[in-house]
Each structure stands twice: as structure tokens, then as C-alpha cells.
Image: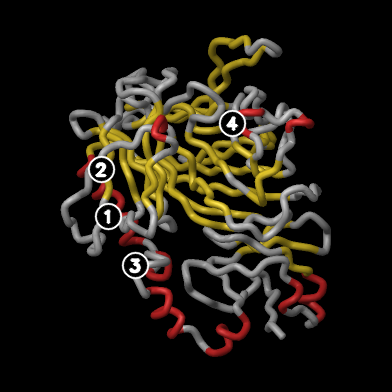
Amino acid sequence: MMPLRRLVLAMSLCIWTGTELYAQQFLEKDNGILHVKFDMTRGGAIGYISTSGSTRNIVNIADEGRYIQQSYYAGKSVDRRAEGQSASWSPWSWNPIQVGDFYRNRARILASSITGNTMYVKCTPMLWDMNNMPAEAEMEQWTTLDSNMLHTRNRLTCHRTDTLYGEGILNDQELPAVYPISALKKLYSYFGNVPFTNAPLNNPAVVNLSSGFWGRYQSNMVSENWMAFVDSTNWGMGVYTPICSNFLAGMAGSPGGEATSGSTSYIAPIKKEALYKNSVYEYEYHVIIGSVTDIRSKVYAIHAALPSSVHREFEKSGCRKARNRRRSDRCKQRRVSCHSTKIDRGIEPHQHKTVCRGRLLCLIDVERIRSGNAGFDDFALIGKTYGIFRKFRVQKGLNFTPR
């Protein structure tokens, strides 16, 4: 018999936050292996993952900073305490997050839908450090439930008007921020020089946040692009982001905590990016539930199916130089590139956004393209995707050659 598949929009108990009465509303799906819920009162973030038939949630949801959610950083750190910024988070950079702010004000849902096995949500995020200040941005999330995996594509669209934070500043981006329960207490990954060869795994000591910060796994040491927290039976949650080989991971509090505990585990694939006022940023990741062996096996299968150009931005030391040598002279001069380009409607009728998987995006004046006058200066930002340089080819017949 085929497993029962349920797809519902459910409403359960109400929660009093002190200022508002929220209906705890979920967009959810059960494929007979996993049961997953988006919390529609908290930006549609992933707030519940269990095995089918179980009521044990392995996502920590103790506050608005937890969940599995989008979180981005732009510009320099600024003291905004006079405007209501939390003293605990001052100074702080522009930091929109999907669930809500430090004061527990929540993100507002703009749209949601279910198409086949994919759930979609769009929200206005909140600035984490500020009191009830929506970010000048939207977040979108597409999650497909596939066997024991969640395949998610995230997108941030910025339309900032502030002049506070500055432009062009590199920040570590959490791609995404993932908070498993602290009962998943053992950390696994692979840190060696022969990735994707089933070499022995690493099981580092878990760094506690009380030491001053999370554990830092830097210098492209996470060479298979995944980390996992598991329990004493080696079952748990793995996070795989193909474009990230640097991670943060650790534990706050103590092992043994569940979904609403103050204690939590934490994983965040990290990548340095400079987000601009009109940036659009998009990336994909997988959450895999199972044994460490199964998690690694699924990562290998996904990795093998990726285009060769996206397997690794840095496979080992010196990779950047090797790839630079393979670029054509013209691309070297122009520094113009894009991978999997498509067109979305822009802010103005005469503008469109190019969407580039895993990288920052540019605003293009389509009228200038059509007239043949488009050039290098028409881009607000030049994207470099996975270390491979290519000319932009704008779909729907809108092609151009950089000056």
C-alpha cells in the first residue's frame, strides 16, 4: 500500500504574546516519511520536522531567533538605540530575519501556496535588533519534500532607502540559520582533502556558545559542504548547502533539550557576500533527516547530480588560480558572469531583475538593452557565480554585449 500523504492548512491553539492574540497557523505536508510545517505566524519559517506518525519536533522554536530560517547581514554595525534598538544587540548591522525580531514581533506573510510537493511562502521580514521595524525587503521560500529530505530555495529581495549602513561591505551570511534540538548533540562532517570519496568522517567536540561564540569551521575546511547534529544512535539532522565550505556550529545551553527548550544546537553554512540596497540574493540548501551514513549518502547523490560548474567554488588551495586561467580573455576584461539566468519583473515597468542562482543579482534597464546601448555601467552589481565567468545572456530574446 502506498503511504498516506497529507497536505493541509491547519489551525491549532492560540498563543497570547502579551500584545496580540496569534492563531498558531501552519502550512504543512506529510509524505509518509517526514511531517513538515511552516509557521504562518512567523514568516513561514520551517518550525516543525518530525518523522511521520511522531509528534516529536526536532527543530528548536524557543524564540524568534531559532527555527530554520533566512537571515542576512548588510553594511556596518550601527548604534540605533535611540530608535528602539535592543541594547543587547547594539551596535548591529542591517539584519532581516524571517521569523521576527528580538522583541518577538513577527514577520508578516504576503503570499503562500502549495503546488504538488512544493510549499511556497513570501513574507516581509523583521530587523532582528529593532523593535517592530519591518525590513525594506521581502523573503521567499520554496520547499520541496522529497523522501527524507527538504530541498529549499530561498530568495531575498531588497529595496532599502536608508543611508545608515553603507554599501559594499562583506558580511558572513547564514545560508540558512538552522536550530536542531539539543538532544541532537553529536556533530559530524568531513574536513579532509579528499571530499566525496567516503573518507573517514570528523566528529569534532561541540563548541558551546558560553565560550564566547559558536564553533568556527573556516578556511574552506568543510569540504563536503555539510554538517549534521545527531543523537546517541547517530540519527539526526544534516544541512547541505553546495556553495558553502565554511560553517558555524555549536550548542547553546546543555544537551538533551527539545523543541521549546532554551538549549539548542545550531548549524549555519556561511558565505561572505556584500548585500546592496537593491540586491536580490538566492541560494539553495537541503535538510536531510536520518542516520549520519544516510545523510552523507544523500549529499553525495545530490552533489553528483549538480552541474560540474557548481560542485565547488574552491575544491582545494589554488583552485581560484586554476579556474582563472581557464577564463577567456574577454571575460577576464569584462568580469561579467551569470549562471542559470532568468528574468523576473522589476520594480519599475522598464526594469527587470536577473536572478542568478546562489549569487547577488543586478537591475538591468531593459529599454537600454533593446536599444543596443546597454553596457557595463548598466549593472548595479556584477555577479560571480561559483568561480565561473560567463557573459550574461538575458532570456526572452534580450541579449547584449558589454562595452
Q: Amino acid under label 4?
A: Val
- Assess disc 1: are there few (<14), some (14-19) or many (≥20) residues with their C-alpha within 10 Å of its C-alpha: many
- Assess disc 3: are there few (<14), some (14-19) or many (≥20) residues with their C-alpha within 10 Å of its C-alpha: some
Cα gap from disc 3 to disc 4, whole angstroms: 34 Å
Query: Where is residue 338 shown, x and y percent of the image?
Result: 57, 70
Camera-near label (4 vs 1) is 1
Query: Where is residue 354 shown, x and y percent of the image?
Result: 66, 63
Per the rendering, the mark at residue 79 is: none
Cα gap from disc 2 to disc 1, whole angstroms: 10 Å
Q: Secondary structure at mark 1?
A: loop
Residue underneath mark 1:
191
Residue underneath mark 2:
204
Q: Are marks 2 and 1 in contact (CB under 8 Å)?
A: yes
Cα gap from disc 2 to disc 3, whole angstroms: 22 Å
Left or right? Give the position of 272 relative to 248. Answer: right
Q: Residue at position x 65%, y 33% from top?
A: 129
Query: Where is residue 313 shown, x and y percent of the image?
Result: 42, 66
Q: Amino acid under label 1?
A: Phe
Q: Quadrant of the C terminus?
A: bottom right
Cα gap from disc 2 to disc 4, whole angstroms: 30 Å
Q: Quadrant of residue 325?
A: bottom left
- Can residue 324 be seen here? yes
Residue underneath mark 3:
315
Q: Residue at position x 81%, y 75% from top?
A: 368
Camera-near label (2 vs 4) is 2
Camera-near label (3 vs 4) is 3
Q: First in sequence: mark 1 or mark 3?
A: 1
Residue 339 vertical position relative to residue 157 in the rendered view, above or below = below
- Assess disc 4: are there few (<14), some (14-19) or many (≥20) residues with their C-alpha within 10 Å of its C-alpha: many
Residue underneath mark 4:
99
